[in-house]
Image (tube, helix red, strand yellow):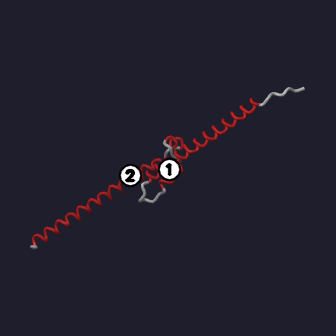
Amino acid sequence: MTTELRSSSFLSRLADTSASALTALGAYAVRRWRIHRNRREVRQLLDWNAHSLKDIGLTPMDVRLAASMPGSVDSSTRLRILAVERRAGERAQARERMAEMRRLEAAARRTVETDSQRPETTAC
């Protein structure tokens, strides 16, 4: 192998490695910028009142919790998770209440049916 061929192979590998490193560095910079921007927006939610936050499925405590996350964590993602968990919990509670209501209605129907099947007694 000639010296020219070896040096061009080395330069090619160096260029590929440099391009990969720059791509990774660019992706890291974009991710950090996005985290910074989202954290700034979450901090702005601290100024909202409880009613406004409730409209978007959050509580003031959710916002404070997300704002207190470490700087490397995207706090908007944490807020999204909290909102989804709360909605899932509320739906589960609603399903439980509906199931309990159905059980009570069924028990009431059975009681009415049982009472209607009993023979009437006359008082003397």
Residue 51 in the image: above or below residue 34: above
Residue 105 lies left or right of residue 58; in this view the side is right
Give the number of the disc on residue 17. Answer: none
Residue type marked 2: Arg
**Left or right, residue 87 beside residue 34:** right
Crowding around mark 2 (Cα neighbors within 10 Å: few <14, some 14 to 19, many 20+) is few
Of 15 and 118, nearer the camera is: 118
Quadrant that contains the N terminus: bottom left
- Say left or right for 14 vs 57: left
Relative to 10, say whether 40 is above or below. above
Judging from the image, what secondary structure is the residue with disc 1 in? helix
Find residue 25 and report its horizontal and vertical position in percent.
29, 61
| Disc 2 secondary structure class | helix
Mark found first going from the N terminus, 2 or 1: 2
Query: Camera-side residue: 70 or 121?
Result: 121
- What number is the disc on residue 37? 2
Residue at 56%, 45% in the rendered image: 92
Mark 2, mark 1: which one is toward the viewer? Answer: 1
Where residue 94 appears, as percent x and y from the top left, is: 58, 41
Rendered residue at 47%/57% (across/down):
69
Occupied quadrant, residue 96: top right
